Amino acid sequence: MLIDRIDLFHVAMPLISPWRTAYGEDYVIESVLVRMASGGVVGWGETSPLATPTYSPEWAAGVFHVLKTWLAPRLVGQDIASGAALQERLGAIKGNPFAKAGLDLAWWDLFARQQGQPLFRVLGGKSPAVTVGADFGVTDSVPALLQQIAQAVNAGFARVKLKFRPGWDLPMLRAVRQAFPDSVFHIDCNSGYRLRDLPLFQQVDEFRLAMIEQPLAHDDILDHAKLQKAIRTPVCLDETVASVDRARQALEVGACGYINIKPGRVGGLTNAVAVHDLCVQHGIPCWVGGMLESAVGVAHCIALGTLPGFTYPADVFPSERFYRRDLGEPPITLSGRSQVQASAEPGLGTVPNLELLSLQTLQHWSSSGA
Ligand code: MG
């Protein structure tokens, strides 16, 4: 596909309520949307590293700058035949997986639209149905959290994920387990602890969690391997797995029992599929994570989640959970209890609402100079 034009939109999407994790609070989600055009057909990608480098070393304004200065110009006017060719073309620029993901995701949507095929089929998915879970950040009080969990459990969500950070840890978990003895839970520490906290995680073992997500540093593999050997609960890596090689190394040293795959964090769908395939080879289950993207980014996550190695419910949520009005159309809705469907339309089946896009755009760049 000859890439005719690329447009970038750095956007700020206001959340209904703040999202609290081990790394802080977000009131808006800053994200970068990528529009890629070839022969009159347009594809969309979205990459959301958040507004500040608190989840990973990247941040939205930085991603926008890297994209417009170094990455997008490498693709415009080029004939890019595959996701692998795109990654190779961007390979001279080190790191910056979220920035590369914006282009990779837009390329896949564009490619699928040109084929006239739904994206999930092009990726190799058999069925459009994806099981999803519920996810709760740090709330004002434990009773408030218990109330939210009760709603999720009654609504039939297959599992519930809880953010976990110093000051919001064992007492919260004890109260949750007492109130819901049989539900599937896991905790996400967002890199908030170190190996010296091993005694805490040995206590976590008693709560029969499905997994402990990213307990240690965002770039660590070896300490996670040591922790995994010292506790019964499976460790799940999220932040650590920023590339296909990082996934391979983590699997080789036994650093985890699960991997959470986010297309943005690993550099796009091309690498997300490769990490998925590695997990399948190693017999390690994986699941799809999210960065509170608009429906455009979530639709990419859903298409990915149709692959067979994704056996644990995804962090995919209905639009109304976080946004009064989703920047992407159609909004994400549940198709049944704890389930969403990948679009049967060609490509992603989701596009930004252009009026809302212009309202929420902080910066725009076009390879055409327009
Ligand atoms: Mg996580």
Image (cartoon, rainbow, N blue to C red):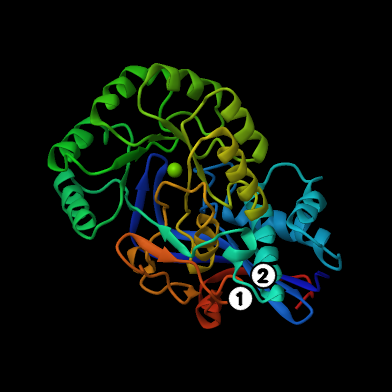
Q: Nearer the viewer, residue 217 or 369?
A: 217
Label 2, secondary structure: give it: helix
The relative height of residue 239 versus residue 270 in the rendered view (above or below) is above
* Label 1, residues with CA under 10 Å away: few <14, some 14-19, many ≥20: many
Number of callouts: 2
Report ligand 1 position as a quadrant: top left
Task: Answer left or right for 119 relative to 207.
Answer: right
- Residue visible at 14% across and 47% down in the picture: 143
- Residue visible at 43% across and 72% down in the picture: 326
Task: Answer left or right for 286 relative to 156.
Answer: right
* Label 2, residues with CA under 10 Å away: few <14, some 14-19, many ≥20: many
Q: Residue flagged by tag 2: what amino acid is it?
A: Ala
Q: Residue flagged by tag 1: what amino acid is it?
A: Pro
Q: Position of residue 146 (x, y in %)?
A: 17, 48
Residue under label 2 = 112
Q: Quadrant of the C terminus?
A: bottom right
Q: Earlier in the sequence, mark 1 or mark 2?
A: 2
Residue under label 1 = 346
- Residue visible at 60% across and 35% down in the picture: 247
Label 1, secondary structure: give it: loop
Quadrant of res 142:
top left
Q: Position of residue 229 (x, y in %)?
A: 44, 18
Q: Position of residue 281 (x, y in %)?
A: 60, 37
Callouts 1 and 2 close, C-beta under 8 Å:
yes
The relative height of residue 221 versus residue 345 in the rendered view (above or below) is above
Quadrant of res 204:
top left
The relative height of residue 312 versus residue 64 in the rendered view (above or below) is above
Residue 35 seen in the current view: no
Q: Quadrant of the N terminus?
A: bottom right
Res 24 label: none
